[in-house]
Image: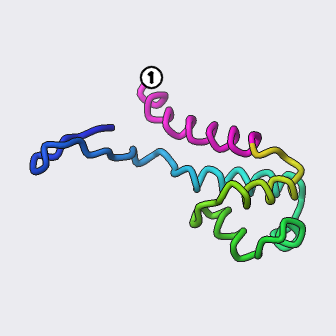
Amino acid sequence: MVKYSALLDSPVVTRPVTEPLLREALGAALRAFRSERNITLRELAEISRVSPGYLSELERGRKEVSSELLASVCHALGVSVADVVIEAAGTMAVAASEPTLAAV
């Protein structure tokens, strides 16, 4: 959504309240894949060589994940990066469309 600032006369981009951030959607997707495989956070940390604390922050959407780290975690989970990104994008699309669906 684009609004124009009266003071600056330039567009100010605001994100809809219902749309999650990419880091939040990626975190949720990683947690879902981990849960489906019944892998604990500690087990995943050991396999992926990422600290449990950092993985926890990723899953909660508090940290941005680098492509290298995402690849390491995905490899440890036995899924492709594309699968995780597609899952995250689906979550974001559903969240963005919910207000439209509710209005119908």
Residue appearing at x 77%, y 54% in the figure:
71
Residue closest to the eye, 66 or 37: 66
User: Quarter holding the N terminus?
Assistant: top left
Residue occupying image coordinates x 70% and y 70%: 56
Residue at image position (65%, 44%) is 88
- 45 vs 97, nearest the viewer: 45
Residue 31 percent coordinates (x, y):
74, 57
Taking the image as shown, residue 53 lies to the left or right of residue 44, namely left
Q: Answer left or right for 101 relative to 5.
A: right
Q: As drawn, which residue projects farthest toward the front?
A: 68
Most frequent secondary structure within the magenta stretch:
helix
Q: Is residue 62 above or below residue 88?
A: below
Find disc 1 in the rendering and name its residue: 104
**Looking at the image, residue 38 lies above or below residue 96:** below
Tell me the element at label 1: loop
**Colouring chosen for the image of the structure:** rainbow
Near-viewer residue (39 or 77)? 77
The boundaries of the magenta stretch are: 82-104
| The image quarter in which residue 35 lies | bottom right
Decide if residue 53 is on the left or right side of residue 63: right
**Within the image, what quadrant is residue 89 found in?**
top right
